[in-house]
Image (cartoon, rainbow, N blue to C red):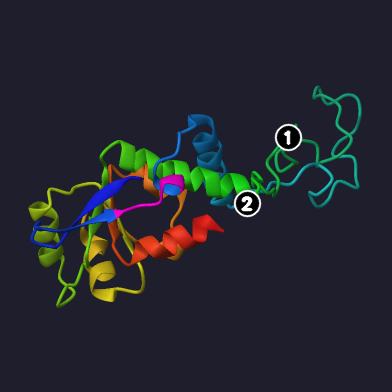
Amino acid sequence: MPTVTVYNLTGEKVEELFLKDEIFNREVNPHILHQMVLSFQAKQRAGTSSTKDRSEVSGGGKKPFRQKGTGRARQGTRTSPLMRGGGIIFGPSPRVYDLKINKKVRKLAMKMALSARWQGDQLMVLDNFHLDQIKTKNLSQVMDRLQLKKTLIVTDQENLNLEKSARNVNGVKVLRADGLNVLDVLRYDRLVLLKPSIPIIEEALGQ
């Protein structure tokens, strides 16, 4: 069973914590993680790019010029893609980019991402992350003390002082446990879990 050391904000060891083996110590399959990342990125695409083809451009009822004698190539409609103001050939149209992945695989990918962080010694657990006020400097001092740089911090509930203080700290993101996703876990070099967030994660992934 995997164990982690719980630290406080001064960097002192508080206790040892046991994690669930089936969530934090699984064999990692890079293919599943890759598919999950692609799916997450695809859902963030708007898919709203659109152009008009020759059938959607207004006008075109009259032949633009006579067939012969002008020296120009024959044209039958102003909406032709060859004409200025005409339709676009093979232009983009609205579409949905979603890549469907079933619930079982999504949970498995999340477990693998967490396991990859624990197995790579990139997982840290804090007993709390209490800041007295919204101040970027205070957060930066804590990050320097704990030797954390590009870090994802996962909280159990709303923590406005922490969330707003982190907005101007480059490479730091604060996320609540119910919004945890594979892409963010893998994107950041370190994963910091607040101790109260662990039961929430284990309950969500254990169902």
Q: Using residue 29 as the reference point, say whether residue 4 is left or right of it.
A: left
- Locate residue 179, reporting x and y percent: 45, 61
Decide: is 6 above or below 70.
below
Image quadrant where one finds the C terminus: bottom right
The residue beneath circle 1 is 90
Which residue: 15% across, 71% down? 135
Separation (CA) of disc 1 from disc 2: 35 Å
Q: Which quadrant of the view contains residue 192?
A: bottom left
Most foreground residue, 160 or 79: 160
Q: Is residue 171 visible?
A: no
Q: How many marks?
A: 2
Task: Please tell me whether residue 128 is drawn above or below residue 55 in the rendered image.
Answer: below
Residue lying furthest front: 1
Q: Position of residue 177 (x, y in %)?
A: 41, 63
Q: Amino acid at mark 2?
A: Lys
Q: Is residue 116 magenta?
A: no
Q: Does the segment drawn in magenta span residue 19?
A: yes
The residue that mark 2 highlights is 103
Kind of residue at badge 1: Phe
Question: For the magenta stretch, what is the residue range?
Answer: 18-22
